[in-house]
Image (cartoon, rainbow, N blue to C red):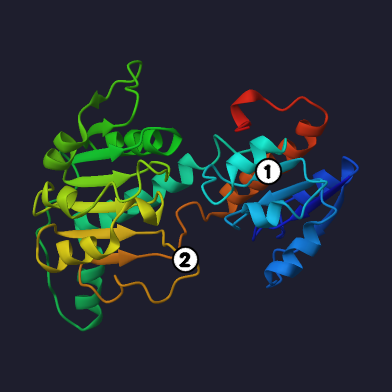
Amino acid sequence: MKAVIMARNFVFDGCDATAMLKDAGFEVTNISDTVLTAAETAEALADADAVINGFEPMNAALLAQCPRLRLISVRGVGYDYIDGAFCREHGIGITRTVGTVGGAVSEQVMAYILYFARQVHRMNAAMQRGEWQRIMTDGAAGKTVGIVGFGEIGQAVAKKAEAFDMRVIYYCRTPKTALPYRFVSLDSLLAESDYVVLALPLTAETRHLIDAAALKKMRSDAVLVNVARAGVVDTDALKEAVETGNIRGAAVDVYEEEPCTDSVLKGVPNILLTPHTAPFTKANFIAMNRLAAQNVIRYFDKTVEDKYLVV
């Protein structure tokens, strides 16, 4: 059987995920480091039994040209860039690396919060200019983190925020009654939070969930953090909200088209932009890559765990 690697950063020193597939008897082809046209991608996947995918779009037009494909192993947890309906109709399984991303993503969320809470970057800049400029900051302790979406990533953010003596509230479709955090409505969360963290999937229902009206419900000293998907936020409305002082600032790690170097948010004071790096640590990618490979192996020997299966 043949496995094609589309996910970038699947092969690097210290990661044995490719060797795992080969040891299990798979022929492995890596196309992640090559820029391919749509036709070239379809040709590369034409005889694939499995694909390991990062954020590479897999629409019906492409999938229709993959007659042997039986599994898309997602290296990550989001899969909104895959045509799930086509997969269900044609018996193509989708697996995810559930349980691997929360630690790294929540770590970066806390970095964003501390960026705004302690202003270390401004004090460093002053010191580098030869100025002794101390800033009395608000700090993080005692502030409220409102988390929208309370799955693996949201819960990991909650644990880290608690360690900084922050108050945690959350909103999601189904309250997590077994967890020691307060569930609130979205409107209440927006009104109460010093930091609003988006950690929910992009669906038809969540697209532009955070629009101009939602941003107006936030406090003027609040910060929006988006590590979910770009489409959850109306980017133009976010830009206006920060520029007009409707909210204090934002940290954004996700974009409609990636790579992105021309975001409309670029150059806006108090908006921190990073190039989709929340999960981007060596340890995390080793864990995700290994689990993505294991999901391929176990899917075909029918031992993959249900928690990793989407369809």
Q: Is residue 30 visible?
A: no
Left or right: 24 in relation to 96:
right
The numbered mark, 2 or 1, whose residue comes first in the sequence reads 1
Left or right: 299 in relation to 186:
right
Establish if 311 lies above or below 72: above
Question: How far across and down, in percent of the image, does residue 187 sit?
Answer: 16, 37
Quadrant (top left, top right, bottom left, bottom right) of the C terminus: top right
Residue at 75% in and 64% down: 31
Crowd rating for badge 1 (residues with CA inside 10 Å; few <14, some 14–19, many 20+): many
Residue at 77% in and 52% down: 66
- CA gap, disc 2 to disc 1? 22 Å
Left or right: 119 in relation to 298:
left
User: Closer to us: mark 2 or mark 1?
Assistant: 2
Crowd rating for badge 2 (residues with CA inside 10 Å; few <14, some 14–19, many 20+): few
Residue 158, label in figure: none
Left or right: 240 in relation to 47:
left
Quadrant (top left, top right, bottom left, bottom right) of the N terminus: top right
Residue at 24% in and 76% down: 125
Residue 257, label in figure: 2
Establish if 188 lies above or below 115: above
Establish if 266 lies above or below 3: below
> The residue under label 2 is which amino acid type?
Glu
Secondary structure beneath label 2: loop
Q: Give the camera-side residue of 144 and 258.
A: 258
Label 1 sits on residue = 73
